[in-house]
Structures are given as C-alpha cells and as structure tokens.
C-alpha cells in the first residue's frame, strides 16, 4: 500500500494542500469527516473512546488500503502507520500572522476576534492530539517533509508533495496484501478488545454512480470542505392515482445531514429546468417541512470558477 499523510497547524490550509495533492497523484482522499462517518458505520453512533481512536482508525484504513492508495488528512495522521518506503508524511506550518489572516477570511472576523478564535483552535488541536495519541503535538521526526505556507499557496505546496511522492514512486507500490491486512487487523483488534470494542466489518468506501459530471464535481467540493453528503438518498412521491399508486416522484441529488438540507443541481436547458422547477414547487407544497436548495447553471458555474474546480458541464 502507499500512504500519504498531510497534517498541520490549524488555519494553515493543510486541508487544501491534502485535497489537491490527492487529486494530483490519484490517491483516495480521507478527511476527518469521512473517517468519522466510517467509524460510526463500523462501531455505531456512540463515539469511540479517545484511547481507542488510533487502533479503530487503523482498522478501517487498513481495510480501505486493500483496494486504494490513501491520502489521509487529519490531525495525528502521521502517527497512524509506521514510517516506511510506502509512506510519505507531510506537515504544513504557517506564521501566526498568516494563520490569523486565514481565520479572518474564513470566518469573516476582525483581527482581534480572529486571534481569539485561532487560540481556541490551537487549544482544541493540542487536546485532540493529546487524548488520541498521548502527546500535545507531534515530534519533528514524525514527518518526512515540512512545508511553510508563508510564501506558498496550496497549489504550490501540493505540487511539491506530488514531486516528493513521484520521487518516492509511491504510485508504483502495490496495494495492501490480504495477509498484511490480516496482521494489521489482528493487532488492532487486540488493542480494541481492551476497550470492549469489536470491529463489525461494515465500513466500506462507497462509490456513488453519478448521473452527471456536474454532480461529481459538487460532491468533490463537499468533500473538500468536509461536509458529509448522501447521493439521491430518498424519493418523494408527488402524485398518486385513485388506487394510491405513486404516479410521479422527485429525487433530489444530494442530502446534507449536518444541515438537514436537500440540494438539487441543474445544468439543463431552460425547457427541462421549467419541468424540474414544477416538481420542486410541488415538493415544497406537499412536504413543507423539507428544506431544499436548487443550484442552477449559473450558481453551479460560479461555484466551479470560485473554487478552481474543473468544469464538467458539456
């Protein structure tokens, strides 16, 4: 298997670096929110105890590594797997002034409030590292490379990570062999058993079969910002015949559980948009408690251009 880990200081933009680096080298992107989702799927909705977090994460990621090379982006990622020829561990740092500026932009705060917010984020990061891994911050020798974002943007740093991964020939490494995964799982299960936890084997990387490239681009954008999503999870009946059989229904493209919001992406011609608008109007009339947001072609294109994503509308 090949493992790329990218972590860093809060508001250093390490998430953006990791996401672009994963795309550049073709690795599966693993964010904090995706891992949390898999943990809930694997171990139930009750949070995994902090002391069991590392073996629980390793158990899930080792299973994924049988089929995918992984780019893991979360605090403490560098400590999940031992250093080897198959791992590349990067850390993104930035001066405090740069990080404060990033918080000002991200949260629309004035500098004093942004400084306070960053201090809180730093405390939370240290606490998370402590309870998960037993120390408040990683050691310098935990990384193969350090990237300072003071004079580099995310794309430049991602290009450096890509170059390092290619120099190490990570993409040429084989996937994790079944016997190696079994050994990792055995060791992880021993540690989890001390906490009365048994992996269920349910967590899997699920690929959505998108109906249109624009939906895949939107899903990538949600992943980038660590927003959990479900693709076409539910159809809403809109009309019924005299025998109660559904004659017309509507299936929104996405559901964002954190916001209890359905999202519909439409890049169709105007005639087809009019038909879809009628269904959405009916949906709101029949199900007034349902929150739905429609992104029309201009809205979608604005998102694509704003975030530098590849245009997928043909």
Image (cartoon, rainbow, N blue to C red):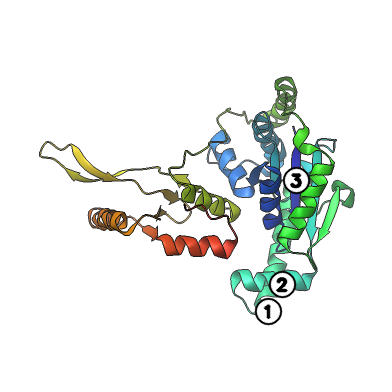
Name the residue beneath numbered marker 1: 111
Q: Residues within 10 Å of mark 2 (few under 14, many from 20)?
A: many
Left or right: residue 217 compared with residue 91: left
Mark 3, residues whose alpha carbon is within 10 Å: few (<14), some, or many (≥20)?
Answer: many
Estimate how packed mark 1 is, as few (under 14), some (14 to 19) or many (20 or more) residues with alpha carbons within 10 Å: some
Residue 227 in sight:
no
Q: Name the residue nearer the viewer: 303 or 100.
A: 303
Q: Which residue position is annotated with label 3?
A: 5
Q: Earlier in the sequence, mark 3 or mark 2?
A: 3
Kindly identify which residue carries mark 2.
100
Residue most extreme to the right? 141
Of tags 1 and 3, the one toward the viewer is: 3
Residue shown at the point (70%, 45%) measured from the top left: 72
| Separation of marks 1 and 3 at Cα, in angstroms | 31 Å
- Residue in the image at 73% along x and 48% along y: 131
- Nearer to me, 228 or 54: 228
| Residue 82 percent coordinates (x, y) | 82, 37
Asked where in the image residue 117 lies, by quadrant, the reply is: bottom right
Residue 95 in percent (x, y) is at 80, 69
Which corner quadrant holds the N terminus?
Answer: top right
Q: Is residue 178 visible?
A: yes
């Amino acid at each position: 298997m090949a493992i790329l880990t990218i972590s860093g200081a809060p508001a250093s933009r390490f998430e953006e670096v990791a996401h672009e680096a994963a795309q550049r080298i073709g690795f599966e992107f693993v964010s904090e929110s995706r891992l949390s989702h898999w943990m809930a799927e694997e171990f139930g909705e009750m949070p995994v105890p902090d002391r069991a977090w590392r073996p629980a994460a390793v158990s899930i990621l080792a299973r994924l590594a049988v089929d995918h090379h992984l780019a893991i982006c979360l605090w403490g990622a560098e400590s999940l797997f031992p250093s080897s020829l198959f791992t590349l561990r990067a850390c993104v740092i930035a001066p405090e002034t740069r990080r404060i500026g990033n918080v000002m932009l991200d949260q629309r705060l004035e500098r004093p409030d942004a400084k306070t917010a960053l201090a809180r984020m730093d405390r939370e990061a240290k606490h998370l590292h402590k309870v998960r891994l037993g120390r408040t911050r990683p050691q310098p020798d935990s990384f193969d490379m350090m990237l300072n974002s003071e004079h580099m943007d995310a794309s430049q740093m991602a290009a450096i990570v890509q170059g390092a991964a290619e120099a190490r020939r990570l993409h040429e490494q084989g996937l994790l062999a079944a016997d190696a995964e079994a050994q990792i799982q055995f060791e992880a299960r021993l540690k989890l058993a001390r906490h009365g936890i048994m992996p269920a084997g349910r967590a899997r990387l699920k690929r959505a079969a998108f109906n249109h490239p624009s939906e895949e681009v939107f899903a990538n954008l949600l992943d980038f910002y660590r927003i959990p999503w479900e693709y076409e999870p539910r159809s809403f009946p809109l009309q019924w015949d005299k025998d109660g059989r559904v004659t017309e229904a509507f299936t929104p493209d996405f559901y964002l559980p954190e916001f209890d919001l359905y999202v519909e992406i439409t890049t169709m011609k105007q005639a087809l948009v009019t038909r879809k608008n009628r269904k959405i109007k009916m949906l709101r009339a029949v199900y007034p408690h349902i929150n739905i947001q429609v992104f029309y072609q201009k809205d979608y294109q604005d998102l694509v251009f704003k975030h530098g994503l590849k245009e997928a509308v043909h």
